[in-house]
Structure formats: C-alpha cells, structure tokens
C-alpha cells in the first residue's frame, strides 16, 4: 500500500505568477526601457535633422523610410537565422549593444561638428536592422523563459510595454529636447539600449532550443513562407494583420489633416487623444491576460476583430459641437487602444501555439515582413486617394476596409464549429 502511494503521480504544480518570475521581469523591463528610448529618438532625431542640419523634404522622407526598410529587406532572413540558433539571448544582447553604439555616435558627432543627415539615415538603418534581428530572436526566446500556459499573459505584458512607451515616451522626449537639445536627447536612446543589454545578460533561464538542420538560406525562408501560407490559422492571422495594417496606415496618412481641418480639433488635444489610446492599451493588456484564462485566445480574437473599425467609423461620421467630438473621440480612442492590444496579444499567443518550435522564428518573421511591409503602401494609398476623393470618404473607406479582417478571422478554424448531433444508439431507439 505504501509503495502504491509512493509511486502515484503527483498533481501538476501551477507555475508562479509572472510578476514573481525573475527572468520574465528582466525580459519585460529590458523591452520596456528599450522601447521607451526608441520613442525618445522618434522625436529627437527628426528634430535634429530639421532644426540643426536643415534637412530637405526629400531627406526627411528618406530618414522616415529608413526606419521601415530593414523589415522589408531582412525580416525573412532574420527568421531563418533565429531558427538556426540554439541560444537566442546572445544575438538579442548583440543587437542591443550595436544599437547603443550607433545611437551614441549622434551626440558625439554633433559635439565634434561632423554630424549630417546622411549619417542619421545610416544610423536609422543600423538600428532598424538590429531591431528586426532582435524581434526574430525574441519571439522563440520567450518560449524558453515563460511556461506555455502563461504565453498569453506574457504577450500582454509586452504589449503593455508598448502602451507605456507610447504614453510616456513623447513627453520624456519633449522634456529631454528642451533640457539637453535634440542630439543629446538621443543619448537617452543609447543608454536605454545599454540598460536593456545588461538586463538580458542577467537572465538565467537556460535555452534548450533544438534547431532544424539548415538547407540553405533560400530554402529555410521558403519553408517559413510555406508553413505560414498553408496552415489555415496562420494564414488567416496573416491576412487579417495585412488587411488591418494597410487600411490603418491609409487612415493615419490623412488623420491629422482631417482632425485639424475638418473636425476643428485643437492641435494640443490631438496629443491628449493619442495618450488616451495608449492608456486604453494598458487597460487592454490587463484585461486580456485575465479573460484569456477563462475564454481562451480564439474567442477574444473573434470578438475584438468585430470592433476594430469603431474609432475610424466614429471619426468619419462625427459632427456636432467641439465638446461632443472630444468626448466621443476620447471614448472610442480608449476602447480601440484596448482592442488593438487584445487582438495583437492573442494573435502572438496563437502563432506561438500553432507553430512548431523549429519554425517559430521564420513564421514570426514572415508575419512581420508582410504586416510591416504593407504600411508604406497603405500610407501612400491613403494620401493619394484623399487627393481624389476627399478626406471623409477615405476615412469611411478605411473603416470598411478594416472590417474585412472580420471575414478572415470568422471563416478560419479559429471559429468553433458546432458538431452534428450524435446518432442515437439502438438502445435509445427502442424507447
């Protein structure tokens, strides 16, 4: 009897909450600090180009594009590289250190009198490339640090980081630019990358990734594309992400003009509305982590995608006094911030769940390539369409376009299918 009790399997032990897991706290802190530093540079570097280097409109366009070009050029290859690695953290640390050195050259060259716009463009390309490599390695690395049952909660925490950065980053950037001047404010970004690298260095969780044997870069990339496009769930998520980002960027291209010239929103209030969107993202991350445990990621995704167009539709139909416009925009913006984070959190968790470990880097990179790559096309389309159709029609078309993402999600296996009623047994037929 004693031997039987001794050999009986012990019940599974639930992992401790993420807030009590040292390595996850380090990983989360590293990302939050790094992203906040990047938000500072988004204001400081363009201000440096405009106010101190007298950049031309063409140069500013090249500087803006330089941040997104690496995703188009290197995203697919970075995913293949990440899937070849047994340990992802060394690559992540190297990327943060490379970005630190690159950002630190901006204030240094300015003090020496050698800074120019061409160098700023080169720095944006270096930091952007390092960011693409970091994201490719960070996605599978998360699986090593966090137990599978807590992937959704961990994803929510990372998206909360983006919301924190979007709320606090611009304010911090403005303060640093005022106190230090724009080039020296970029030093904050360099320090954030260095801090992130040190925090990542302190993580102790061992990585036991078993990479699949490489068949060459092109074949590895093709395998990631094939895995994403042939898997019904992954394909639906990819199509929905591309649809949402295309029309969201088309809306962003005309948003400022419409808010100021058509709705008459004071310029100072636009920043407050953007901050509310970030606050909604924080709330969405907190709620999603709890709802996912009860309802699952699939149901949350099915629900949130329905409400994606709500803010854009409200903006396109909005009329009335200023107080009413501001009130409705504040409410819909906050709700949309939460919806976007909930959708992105569950999307990332489902990709992690549905993808085999040896393909996680490539599938994530394929999604990044498509979802980020469509941004430039969406922005260009929105601007050109507004010249021909007007601002309000384009905004309403963007709301309708984003609503199409519902079709991709609701016709996929993510939607539960009702099973046909079971055939009565012979025993039941007797009665």
Image (cartoon, rainbow, N blue to C red):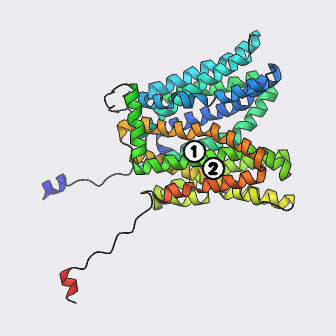
Element marked by disc 2: helix
Q: Give the residue at the far front of this rendering.
A: 388
10 Å crowding of disc 2: few (<14), some (14-19), many (20+):
many
Mark 2 in CB contact with mark 1 (< 8 angstroms)? yes
Element marked by disc 1: helix
Provide the residue designation for mark 1. 159
Answer yes or no: is residue 195 visible: no
- The x, y position of residue 242, in whole percent, is 56, 45
Q: Which of 149 and 355 lies nearest the eye of the viewer?
A: 355
Residue under the image location 75 percent in, 45 percent down: 254
Residue under the image location 56 percent in, 54 percent down: 405
Q: Is residue 51 above or below residue 426?
A: above
Answer yes or no: is residue 236 visible: yes
Tag shown at residue 281: 2
Task: Name the quarter where the N terminus is drawn.
Answer: bottom left
Q: Which of 257 and 113 lies nearest the eye of the viewer?
A: 257
Q: Which of 134 and 225 lies nearest the eye of the viewer?
A: 225
- The x, y position of residue 300, in whole percent, is 51, 58
Q: Is residue 122 above or below residue 287?
A: above
Query: Which of the 4 quarters of the picture holds residue 87?
Result: top left
Task: Name the quarter where the C terminus is drawn.
Answer: bottom left
Residue under the image location 53 percent in, 24 percent down: 95
10 Å crowding of disc 1: few (<14), some (14-19), many (20+):
many
Q: Is residue 386 above or below residue 309?
A: above
Q: CA distance from mark 2 to mark 1?
A: 8 Å
Tag shown at residue 42: none
- The x, y position of residue 241, in whole percent, is 55, 47
Residue under the image location 44 percent in, 47 percent down: 234
**2 or 1: tag closer to the N-terminus:** 1
Q: Which of 109 and 380 lies nearest the eye of the viewer?
A: 380
Q: Is residue 141 above or below residue 421?
A: above
């Amino acid at each position: 009897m004693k031997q039987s009790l001794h050999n009986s399997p012990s019940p599974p032990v639930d992992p401790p909450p993420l807030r009590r897991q040292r390595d996850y706290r380090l990983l989360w802190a590293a990302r939050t600090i790094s992203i906040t530093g990047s938000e500072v540079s988004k204001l400081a570097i363009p201000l440096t180009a405009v106010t101190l280097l007298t950049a031309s409109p063409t140069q500013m366009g090249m500087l803006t594009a330089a941040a997104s070009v690496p995703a188009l050029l290197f995203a697919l290859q970075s995913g293949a590289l990440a899937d070849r690695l047994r340990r992802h953290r060394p690559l992540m640390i190297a990327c943060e250190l490379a970005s630190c050195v690159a950002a630190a050259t901006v204030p240094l060259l300015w003090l020496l009198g050698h800074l120019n716009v061409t160098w700023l463009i080169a720095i944006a390309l270096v930091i952007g490339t390092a960011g693409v490599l970091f994201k490719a390695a960070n996605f599978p690395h998360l699986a090593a640090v966090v137990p599978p049952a807590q992937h959704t909660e961990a994803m929510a925490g990372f998206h909360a980081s983006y919301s924190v950065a979007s709320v606090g980053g611009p304010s911090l950037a403005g303060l640093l630019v005022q106190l230090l001047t724009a080039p020296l404010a970029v030093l904050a970004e360099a320090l954030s990358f260095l801090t992130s690298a040190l925090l990542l260095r302190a993580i102790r969780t061992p990585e036991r990734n078993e990479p699949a044997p490489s068949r060459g870069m092109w074949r590895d990339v093709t395998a990631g594309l094939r895995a994403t496009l042939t898997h019904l769930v992954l394909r639906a998520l990819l199509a929905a992400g591309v649809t949402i980002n295309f029309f969201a960027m088309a809306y962003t291209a005309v948003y400022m003009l419409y808010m100021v010239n058509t709705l008459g929103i004071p310029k100072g209030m636009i920043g407050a509305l953007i901050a509310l969107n970030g606050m909604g993202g924080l709330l969405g991350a907190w709620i999603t982590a709890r709802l996912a445990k009860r309802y699952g990621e699939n149901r949350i995704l099915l629900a949130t995608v329905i409400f994606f167009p709500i803010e854009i539709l409200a903006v396109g139909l909005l009329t009335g006094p200023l107080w009413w416009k501001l009130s409705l925009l504040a409410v819909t913006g906050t709700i949309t911030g939460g919806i976007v984070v909930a959708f992105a959190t569950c999307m990332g968790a489902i990709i992690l769940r549905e993808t085999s470990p040896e393909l996680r880097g490539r599938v994530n990179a394929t999604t990044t390539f498509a979802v980020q790559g469509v941004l430039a096309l969406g922005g260009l389309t929105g601007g050109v369409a507004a010249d021909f159709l007007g601002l309000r029609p384009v905004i309403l078309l963007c709301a309708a376009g984003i609503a199409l993402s519902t079709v991709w999600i609701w016709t996929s296996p993510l939607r539960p299918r009702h099973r046909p009623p079971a055939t009565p047994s012979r025993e039941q037929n007797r009665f």
